[in-house]
Image (tube, rainbow, N blue to C red):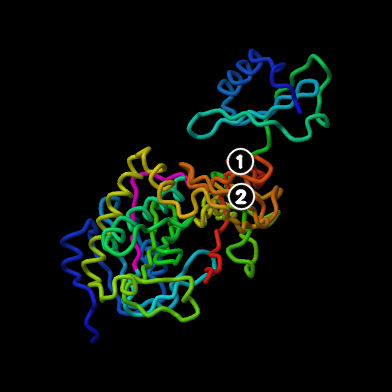
Amino acid sequence: MTIPPFDLDAIRGETFVADVVYHDTLDSTNDLAHTIAADGSPDPGSPVLFLAAYQTRGRGRGSNSWHAARGGLTFSLLLGFDNPIQPSRFPPLALATALGVSRALSSRLAEVVSDVRLKWPNDLVVNDRKICGILVEPLRGPSPGVIIGVGVNVNNRLDPSLENHATSLADLLGNHVPLTDLLIEILSGIEQTTGAWQNGDPTLAADWTRSCHDIDRPVVTETPRGPIEGICRGIDSDGRLILDLPNGSRQAIASGSLHFRERQS
Amino acid sequence: MADEQAFDLDKLRELIALMDEHGLSEVSLTKGDQAWKVRKDSGDSIQMVPAANATDTAAPAGSAPVQAAPPTIDSPVVGTFYSAPTPDDPAFVKVGQAVSADTIVCIVEAMKVFNQIPAEMAGTIAEVLVNNGDAVEYGQPLFRIQPG
């Protein structure tokens, strides 16, 4: 039997999750959470954490996969709600989650980097390199709830093909990071910011614009209808990217990706 | 484009009162070269959107016919419409297909959140009003549905 790289009792005792479902290896923690949620309504007051030491098929946005080698942190939170949530509220939940994770990572990295930034719509980056991805998926059945998937590069070795695009906490700090401690810090951050989201805290939108990696930069957004170029002016309260276009108009973009540009050497 | 200044607010109030009286959630109003559609959502807020092809449906001057619009399944969020779970899958629904309130009819993606949209009414899909990959607005009709 493989010894978990996590202290599951500490996670249960020191965080807002009511239960932890741990597997050494999983295809995808989000998929397992969907399967469990389909068997019964999630309890609104009892978030469940799905945790894996190793994900073989962690999903990123769309068909992208999350490279989750051992040593990384990959988990999903299943949150139930008393009442149905309007679909338009889920993108802000993803951003709120990103803020929560960002605060925990910023605290860890305070001595080595100036900032963890939010890469619209659902990534965190340090020094232009991705360190965390977030995937929010509303439950597929009639029960009101959501699954928040989070992947953080911690002690995992990064695929060489991602060298210019990804980084990890261990790389940045130069030492191994205890996964349980980090997970507890991240869950604490998520508890705060998702609580603020649930309460309709109006300051959240200002926080995610302040954290926006591309604020006031020229960017190219790849959308399903083609690329859109403009100057990034932030992220609105609905979670849309605000761009000032070359023709002087302002556009709010709901679907798209800001791709990493090759770093200049 | 209709001139909003020329629109008769008293007529609008009358229209809303008629909706309440007859329990209607959506009506179309056509007057001269103006055409407006008024829709009440579940939260009882009222949206007015310019109706398409106003000049095609213009009624004789001086009349203001009120008619119940065929029910539609509307987008609950701004985003991108997807008719199938993945490009390799068949569409969730097709014209002529019977649906129940829980039947998933499409996905609307916004900021990488893929919202599966249920029909929320029983009936038969009569028309698909948008194309796969289209940008859709909040409240935009996606499907026309024949109740039953």
Which residue bears the numbered disc 2? A230
Q: Position of residue B109 (x, y in %)?
A: 55, 54
Secondary element at tag 1: strand
Q: Quadrant of the N terminus of chain B?
A: top right
Residue A78 drawn in magenta: yes
Which residue bears the numbered disc 1? A250
Give left or right: position of A169 versus B93. left
Q: Position of residue A213 (x, y in %)?
A: 46, 55
Give left or right: position of B29 versus A42. right
Q: Residue at x 41, y 57 (%)?
A: A117
Secondary element at tag 2: strand
Q: Which mark is first along the chain, 2 or 1? A: 2
Q: Quadrant of residue A256?
A: bottom right
Q: Position of residue A211 (x, y in %)?
A: 40, 51
Q: Residue at x 34, y 56 (%)?
A: A41
Up-down: is A134 above or below B101? below
Q: Residue furthest bottom?
A: A1
Residue range corresponding to the magenta coloring: A75-88
Q: Is residue A107 visible?
A: yes
Q: Quadrant of residue A94?
A: bottom left
> Viewer-proximal residue, A127 or A125?
A127
Tell me the chain of label 2. Answer: A
Mark 2 belongs to which amino acid? Gly
Up-down: is B97 above or below A264? above
Query: Does label 2 lie on the same chain as label 1?
Result: yes
Mark 1 belongs to which amino acid? Arg
> Viewer-proximal residue, A214 or A93?
A214
